[in-house]
Every structure is written in C-alpha cells, then in structure tokens.
Amino acid sequence: MKRSQINAIIKDFEAMLKEHCFELPPFLSFTPEEWAEKGHEYDEIRDNALGWDITDYGEGNFEKKGLSLITIRNGNVHDPKYPKTYAEKIMMIYPGQISPNHFHWSKMEDIINRGGGDVVFHLWNANRENEGELLDTDVEIFKDGRCYKVPAGSDVVLRPGESLTLYPYYYHEFIIPEDSTKVLVGEVSMCNDDNMDNRFYEPLGRFPTIEEDEPPYRLLCTEYPPAKD
C-alpha cells in the first residue's frame, strides 16, 4: 500500500468516528514527531500494539480484501506485566470489502455494528481434527441475547446496533455489501493475540508492505520508535 493511501484512510476513519461521536484516547492523535519524544510511560501502547492498523493482508487489494482498525485497549498473554484479560477495537469497513475467513483458537469476541450500513457474516464450525475443513453442520448463533441455528455459510446480517458473539473454532468472514455504506464496527473480546491466535482459512499476511510516497500522518501500531530515555 502507498503511504498516501494509508494517510487518506486514517483521515476518513477519523471523520467517521467524529460523525458518530466516538471519542478516541489522546495517543491516537500523536504525530510521528510527537512519538519520537515519548518515553517509557507509553510502553503499554508499544508493547501491546495499540493504535492504528490498516491492512490489505499482504495482497495489495485493499478495496476488496482490507480492514481499517484501531486497537484501543489490550492485555498481553505473553507478558505478565500487562494482565488485562480483555481487548477493545473499533473498525471502519468500506462497501465491497471482505474480512477474510478465519477463526481464533482462544479468543471469544463480540462484534458490534456501531453505525452506517449492514454487516453480513458467514459462519462455519471448524473441524477440530482438521482445522482446514469447514464443517457442513448448523452453526449456533448468539446474537444480542438470542440463540438460534443457521445452516453453515448462511447470511447473518448485523444492522446498526446489533452484535454477534463469536466463540473459538467458529470460522467467520464478514462483508459490507456493494450497495451499502461504510460501517463502523466495534469489537469487545478476550485478550487479543494477532501473532498466535488467528487461523486463516487461506494463508494470508497480516500487515501491508508500504511504499513511502509521502510522510506518515499517523504511525501504525507496528511503527513506533523506541522510547526516548
């Protein structure tokens, strides 16, 4: 991805958050120059990859397979220094974009439509003996206090205000219909570990390769400089 594209997406994300009156913590407005002056008091942000995260899953087709997200809070399953057992994210997804099919070995999460258009989910049970297999069995849906079953791969639509609980070993993908508007999507979950707890149905990268065609507007969560002593 070009840095200019990432910058434009972040500015659009900020505008959408403002439109929906969703306020962000102060660190998400730090400039690269401000980050260069920050000391160890911000280690939690650096160590737990809090902040801006724009990805095309390494495939260079952000318009179809991409996601814009912010990790607002998180613990760290690998470091007892950060004992939080929960995480929170906010995402912006454009019409036509898909978040690719995957499950989590450990994490349970609620995905919430915070506003905009509809989000369409497809879910499958994973075969625990062969994790690359999508089972053709009914999937139990937990949606805003209602429990029911749907055939594997069926459309499960989240309209603004609605949420869906996803358990470990639930393969899931979600799409914003082409004729919809962009959507603000929230996630409240157990502690998030993107390095070890994601099982994509088809192997994918996690972070984009960036072409530096202009200076960064905000640093991504993988780009923070070391703490200033």
Image (tube, grey):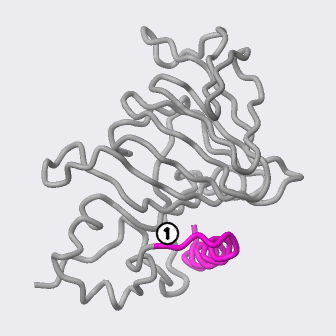
Residue at the outermost left position: 229
In the rendering, at what x and y percent does residue 111 appear? Answer: 58, 43
> Image point 48% across, 83% down: which residue?
216
In the picture, which quadrant includes the N terminus?
bottom right
- Whether residue 169 sits left or right of residue 139 in the image: it is left
Neighbours of disc 1 within 10 Å: few (<14), some (14-19), many (20+): some
> Image point 36% across, 65% down: which residue?
222
Q: Which residues are magenta?
A: 1-24
Q: Is residue 99 magenta?
A: no
Is most of the magenta stretch helix, strand or loop? helix
Looking at the image, residue 51 lies above or below residue 56: below
In the rendering, at what x and y percent does residue 177 appear? Answer: 82, 47
- Quadrant in the picture for residue 21: bottom right
Observer-nearest residue: 69 or 113? 113
- Quadrant in the picture for residue 224: bottom left
In the rendering, at what x and y percent does residue 25 appear? Answer: 42, 74
User: What amino acid does circle 1 point to?
Assistant: Ile
Q: Secondary structure at mark 1?
A: loop
Residue corresponding to mark 1: 210
> Image point 51% across, 41% down: which residue?
204
Looking at the image, residue 224 lies above or below residue 217: above
